[in-house]
Image (cartoon, rainbow, N blue to C red):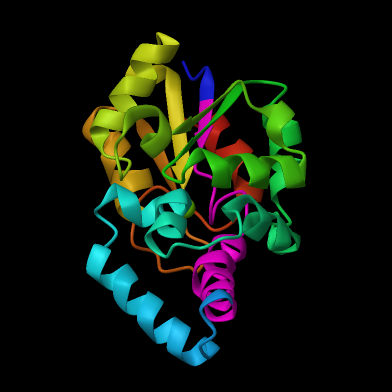
Amino acid sequence: MIKVVSFDLDGTLVKSTFADKVWLEGLPKLYSKEKNISIKQAKQYIYKLYEKVGESRKEWYDIDWWFKRFDLKQSWKNLLDNYKHYIKLYNDTIETLDKLTKKFKLIIISNAKKEFIEIQLGETNIKPYFDHVFSSLSDFNLVKKTPEVYIKVLNFLKLKSNEIIHIGDNLEFDYKCPQRIGIKSIYLDRNKTKKADNIIFSLYELEKVISNL
Ligand SMILES: [Mg+2]
């Protein structure tokens, strides 16, 4: 029996615009200002370095590390604050959380770092819905939501794999990985690519799918 409904955060409950704006616009802009070069040059330089570091390394997600790497004087907290107006929920988020919170415990499992998770939950006021919020990177030192992350969450919450269901927009890390250790998962396919068996196109469908399990 399902006791816990687990959500991914970016691209599932919250739109991904905020993180994109911070990394692709905010950081280059700040760099260009502090180093007195054009924004175009700053973008070229920084994007190349992003690529070089690559998303399989922890540093890639670590804004504090980048600020030190670039020797920036302003604090990264200011940068996140300056871009927080880009944090937006999807239209189907609140209604879904309102319904599901009456029947299940809700949690978040994200691969974002805690500082990105916290500002997004704070800005959207959805934190009270969740019993636990896990960051694979900040809590378990793991870059991607591999099966190991889900095992750690089960152990932490003292749950069996058939007592939890996970929903998210990444086919590999939200859909296939939980299934590898026997956790049921639903692929949130907002772009209608139809690449999985257990699909919903919006969160509005979620309650019904869970009750039909
Ligand atoms: Mg996602």
Residue displayed at 64% across by 27% down: 130
Work out whether 146 lies above or below 32: above
Residue at the extreme top of the image, as rendered: 158
Q: Residue at x 76, y 62 (%)?
A: 85
Q: Total of numbered circles in the picture?
A: 0
Residue nearest the observer in this picture, 29 or 69: 69
Q: Residue at x 52, y 22 (%)?
A: 4
In this rendering, does residue 170 appear at all?
no
Image spot of residue 92 (x, y percent) = 70, 52
Vertical comparison of 175 with 165: above or below: below
Any part of residue 144 in sight: yes
Identify which residue, 50 or 146, lies in the foreground: 50
Residues rendered magenta in the picture: 5-33
84 relative to 168, above or below: below
- The percent coordinates of residue 174 (x first, y second) are 38, 45
In the rendered structure, does residue 159 fall within the stretch colored magenta?
no
Q: Residue at x 31, y 35 (%)?
A: 178
Quick check: 148 left or right of 126?
left
Left or right, 67 with reference to 211: left
Q: On the picture, is 90 further left or further right than 67?
A: right
The answer to which of 177 and 67 lies nearer the viewer is 67
The percent position of residue 111, horizontal first and vertical second, equals 41, 44
Residue 198 in the image: x percent, y percent?
40, 47
